[in-house]
Image (cartoon, helix red, strand yellow):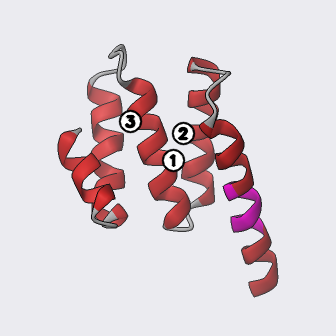
Amino acid sequence: MIAAIELRSDNACDRAAPIYEVWLEAYPTSRYQATALVGAADCRLLLGDRERARAHIDRLAQLEPKKASLRIFAAGLRNVEADESVVR
């Protein structure tokens, strides 16, 4: 996951997101699940991949329903949806 965190900090979400997702599958009971879900959701939103971001956000909401970043992600999803409706 460290590689994903470093790539994300370098704005390389196209490479970081798949690493987060593989890590999430490989370590489903890790205490760092929330960290990986936040990173994966953030990257997917930045890449405009609303459906995959939503899946990560939903998992995060189940894991840590009081996580402050959930509100930020909800706003991010709304922004992506608004952008998509303008393009149509």
**Dot 1 lies on which element?**
helix
**In terms of sequence position, does the residue under pointer 2 or pointer 3 come before the other?**
3
User: Residue 21 lies in what quarter of the image?
Assistant: top left
Instruction: Pick the residue in front: 42 or 86.
Output: 42
Marks 2 and 1: in contact by CB < 8 Å?
yes
Amino acid type assigned to the residue bearing label 1 in the image: Ala
- Residue 40, percent from left and from top: 43, 46
Which residue is pictured at 40% across the width and 32% down the height?
35
Q: CA distance from mark 3 to mark 1?
A: 8 Å
**Dot 3 lies on which element?**
helix
Which residue is pictured at 56% across the width and 50% down the height?
53
- Residue 66, percent from left and from top: 67, 22
Residue at mark 1: 41
Amino acid type assigned to the residue bearing label 2 in the image: His
- The magenta-colored residue range is 76-81
Residue 35 on the magenta span? no
Q: Would you place residue 5 above or below residue 59 in this image?
A: below
Residue at mark 3: 36
Query: In this rendering, which labeled residue sits more in front, label 2 or label 3?
Result: 3
Residue at mark 2: 56
